[in-house]
Image (cartoon, rainbow, N blue to C red):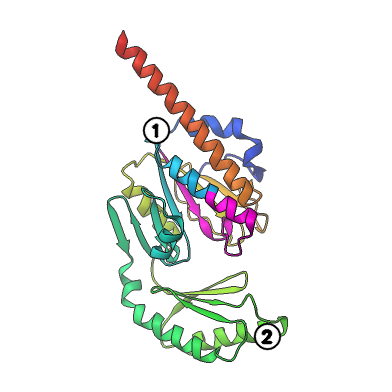
């Protein structure tokens, strides 16, 4: 991947990003929702931003030179229900299940292990039945342990219990630790990077410029194998310096708003130019 910048706020260098976005024939906007923009505990301001996000995604996807994909750890149908934006690609369970205009994909080996995930969720629910503040969420292809409401004294016990259950399991699982949650998926040969590449192939524009918006905490770069991708990391919880930074959800909205207006103005200019030529 070509390195465009190191650790600069994207909103401060739009004059540099603009030409790179403009020269692309098509743009694939990838938004990794969890962490980058998650209104799970939405107050009035967060609720406003969430509605604004839906409006902007709906506006952007109407532009002929734009495709949009949204990824989350949520079940795909739940994610689609929350956003409700037509015409975009939804990736649930961190890319294990994908649906969009004209395509659908569910990772076969993960599907084959759905019964094992269900058994694991039942076991976790049983073990944590007497824990106040622990919630087990089964999502078909994965299971999440939420412990946001657990007392500080019990956090370490929750961690030990989860690790002990996985260590004693006959089936291999992949454990991801996020803030106040454990996400558990079957261990398969498929990851976020594979999902990003699959969606890019399916969008019908192999030359598309990928703009990938993700949170900084995971340290992952699923767009790392995509040539010339522009990666924007939200937040400042990363050990390495990203190409571009965005401070938080409000700036995600600001960036998408700029992109929508920038591309809309450019498209209108191209339309006017085509009309002038047609009258000659």
- Decide if residue 207 is on the left or right side of residue 73: left
User: Among all residues in the image, which is located at the extreme front?
Assistant: 44
- Residue 194 at what x, y percent from top left? 40, 58
Residue 41, above or below 229: below
Q: What numbered label is drawn on residue 154?
A: 2
Q: Secondary structure at mark 2?
A: helix
Mark 2 or 1, closer to the camera: 2
Residue 201, above or below 181: above
Q: Residue at x 50, y 43 (%)?
A: 56
Q: Is residue 74 visible?
A: yes
For label 2, the crowd category at 10 Å Cα-Cα, with few meaning under 14, some 14 to 19 and many 20 or more, is: few
Q: Image quarter for residue 164?
A: bottom right
- Residue 232 at what x, y percent from top left? 57, 47
User: Which residue in the protein does label 1 denote?
Assistant: 25
- Residue 58 at what x, y percent from top left? 44, 45
Rendered-image quadrant of the C terminus: top left
Q: What numbered label is drawn on residue 116?
A: none
Q: Nearer the viewer, residue 222 or 159?
A: 159
- Residue 128 at what x, y percent from top left? 56, 88
User: Among all residues in the image, which is located at the extreme top?
Assistant: 280
User: Among all residues in the image, which is located at the extreme right?
Assistant: 153
Precedes in sequence: disc 2 or disc 1: 1
Q: State the separation of the CA atoms marked 2 and 1.
A: 53 Å
Q: Nearer the viewer, residue 144 or 196?
A: 144
Q: Residue at x 64, y 59 (%)?
A: 43
For label 1, the crowd category at 10 Å Cα-Cα, with few meaning under 14, some 14 to 19 and many 20 or more, is: few
Q: Secondary structure at mark 1?
A: loop
Q: Residue at x 54, y 31 (%)?
A: 18
Asked if the magenta segment contains residue 29, the reply would be yes
Specify the segment rendered in magenta: 27-51
């Amino acid at each position: 991947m070509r390195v465009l910048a190191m650790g600069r706020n994207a909103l401060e260098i739009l004059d540099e990003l603009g030409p790179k976005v403009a020269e692309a024939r098509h743009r694939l906007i990838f938004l990794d929702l969890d962490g980058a923009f998650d209104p799970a505990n939405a107050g009035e301001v967060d609720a406003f931003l969430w509605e604004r996000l839906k409006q902007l995604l709906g506006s952007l996807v109407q532009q002929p030179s734009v495709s949009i994909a949204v990824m989350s750890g949520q079940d795909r149908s739940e994610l689609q229900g929350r956003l409700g934006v037509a015409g975009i690609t939804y990736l649930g369970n961190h890319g294990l299940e994908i649906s969009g205009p004209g395509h659908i994909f569910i990772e076969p080996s993960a599907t084959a292990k759905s019964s094992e995930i269900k058994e694991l969720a039942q076991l976790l629910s049983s073990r944590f039945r007497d824990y106040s503040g622990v919630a087990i969420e089964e999502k078909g292809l994965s299971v999440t342990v939420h412990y946001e409401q657990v007392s500080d004294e019990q956090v370490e016990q929750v961690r030990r219990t989860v690790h002990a259950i996985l260590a004693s399991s006959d089936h291999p699982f992949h454990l991801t630790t996020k803030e106040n949650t454990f996400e558990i998926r079957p261990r398969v040969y498929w990851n976020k990077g594979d999902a990003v590449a699959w969606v890019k192939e399916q969008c019908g524009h192999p030359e598309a410029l990928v703009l990938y918006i993700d949170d900084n905490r995971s340290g992952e770069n699923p767009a790392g194998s995509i040539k010339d991708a522009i990666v924007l990391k939200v937040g400042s919880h990363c050990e390495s310096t990203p190409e571009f930074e965005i401070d938080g959800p409000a700036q995600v909205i600001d960036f998408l708003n700029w992109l929508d207006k920038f591309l809309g103005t450019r498209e209108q200019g191209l339309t006017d130019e085509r009309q002038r030529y047609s009258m000659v």
